[in-house]
Image (tube, rainbow, N blue to C red):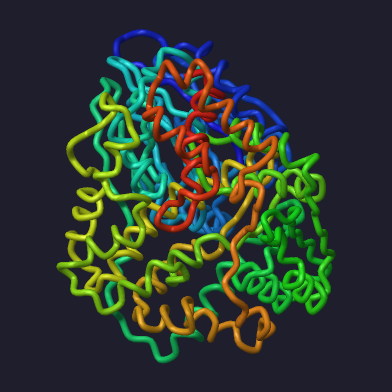
Amino acid sequence: MCGIGGELRFDDRAADPGAVRRMLPCLQHRGPDAEGLWHDGPVALGHRRLQIIDLSASGAQPMTDEQLGLTLVFNGCIYNYQQLRAELRGYGYTFFSSSDTEVILKAYHRWGADCVQHFLGMFAFAVLEHATGTVMLARDRLGIKPMYLAETPGRLRFASNLPALLAAGDVDTSIDKVALQHYMTFHSVVPAPRTIITGVRKLPPATVRIIQRDGRSTEHVYWEASHTRKAADNWPEAIHEALRTAVERRMVADVPVGVLLSGGLDSSYIVALLAEQGQRGLTTFSIGFESAAGESGDEFAYSDIIAKQFDTRHHQIRIGRDRFLPAVARTVAAMSEPMVSHDAIAFNLLSEDVAQHVKVVQSGQGADEILAGYSWYPPLAGVARDRAVDAYAQEFFDRPHRELARQLNPQWLIDTDVSREFVAAHFARPGAATAVDAALRLDTQVMLVDDPVKRVDNMTMDWGLEARVPFLDHELVELAAACPPELKLAQGGKGVLKDAARGVVPDEVIDRTKGYFPVPGIRHLEGRMLEMVRDALHAPAARDRALFRPEYVDALLAVPNTPRTTLGANQLWQVALLEMWLQDKGI
């Protein structure tokens, strides 16, 4: 796991290594162990390293293979790199390191852009052909690893996070109005390729971009889960076996691997499968907060059941107000894009403590999106396909488009309901026969990538911690996509997963009410936290930007915990978080 950055020039000028060097401090937390910079003519590449596989200097990046004429920067982990290494040796390749990075170089030389089809893992990388000047950018199938782009005439820069591109300079930092509409409507998700900043875009997941020396480029999507039916003799057993394989794959490392144990089914199942595979003395971590407004701030009762049953070395991390408030500013600073979920603060604090014990953890993200665990899926069951867009919008959108006219200042409004149009275009694509299938396909390809997955990546990497997500093993995702919706919706959601876990995970964890990362201090704004929110919305930068109508802001501040979005999120936190992020980034 690492941080990468680079600059490509297409105007007969040399790349600016100084610009790439300015990126590296913004990537240091992603890779605290080492730094590398390489430049030659129109290309400059930078890297910050987190040593997980091949801890020696042989695994350092940027990595050049002089014999093959290739240079690579890579962020992620290729779980099947040892198998690929053996296969490539059979084709006559020799290796100078034991890293998965070098396997990517050889795989690219052997298979070209199709190398991504051979990789099991999470990745974002850039590989340069010295002879032709061609550069390939690639991102993994589920977008677990990020790649941000800033393009101007004659130049392209890329980086693992948005702040690195800002640090490099010469970025159009005006607010993207379409992205703002998505932020306010589409549950604060801004779908790729947009970001909230006009001058920064992101490479979509499962995408390869080939860039010629003169700047001409082509882009193609190389993978998609079909969400069409196929037969299985026993769906719970098939899901169990696929998850077992996914969990086993994610133990590959030259350092210890722990588990983030929330106490819910998903992370508990991971612990159970690791124990089944003979892992002893597994290190697990749970977090809890002080209660607020009568809402409990921890789920230790459930995580303790799992820790005891599977004899893990368990760490309960209890967060008081003395740590919570300072963590808010650090969490906002760690965000590549504004992320409203209060889970972000929990993950940041959790990662801070976990990083003192291990460098790699497995986490349960993704199960709800691929196996219908959220509240907005059941209302879509039985909805006719031609009414699916309206039904999804009613359940998931934070507010109807018409309400934006009362919330945003006129200069930021767009007549078109861009979020509804985006969903309608996605739902209209072939496949995904039912409304539930269409929603799951959209959420897996868009919401999952730009909400929970991005949140976990940003917050764990803020402390140099690598998070691996077995539920997003692409073979498991393909299997889940083919599973009939009624099996996923059963038992209050994730029914097929609950059946798969029977006899492996204790029933009291399987049958518990669905929980979320409880962070009462954000769900119920009061005291110093409310003062921070008020200060952000009344800051000179906020007044000058004038995103929100003053009467809307005043109404939210008058009753800070009453106005809620469709899914029950705090509207005041949503608008304040955007301003806090923009101000933190100096935009």
Q: Please indicate, yes or no, whether residue 267 appears anywhere in the rendered image.
A: yes
Q: Is residue 118 left or right of residue 521?
A: left
Please provide percent x and percent y for residue 95.
59, 44
Residue 525 versus residue 21: which sits nearer the camera? 525
Residue 466 vertical position relative to residue 279 in the rendered view, above or below: above
382 vs 476, nearest the viewer:
382
Q: Residue at x 46, y 55 (%)?
A: 119
Work out which residue is located at the far bottom of the displayed protein and give it.
233
Which residue is outermost to the top?
13
Q: Is residue 470 above or below residue 112?
A: below
Locate residue 306, reporting x and y percent. Answer: 75, 74
Q: Residue at x 52, y 43 (%)?
A: 559
Residue visible at 17% across and 60% down? Answer: 428
Q: Quadrant of residue 173?
A: top left
Horizontal arrangement in the rendering, residue 182 relative to residue 105 (left or right): left
Question: Looking at the image, which is closer to me, 411 or 129?
Answer: 411
Q: Is residue 465 above or below residue 149?
A: below
What is the x, y in percent for residue 496? 47, 82
Asked which quadrant contains residue 227, the reply is bottom left
> Is the residue 112 above or below the residue 434 in the image?
above
Residue 337 in sight from this viewpoint: no
Residue 74, image x, y percentages: 53, 38
- Relative placement, left or right, of 187 versus 435 is right
549 or 330, nearer to the observer: 549
User: Who's the residue at 36% across and 20% down the image?
Assistant: 174
Q: Quadrant of the N terminus?
A: top right
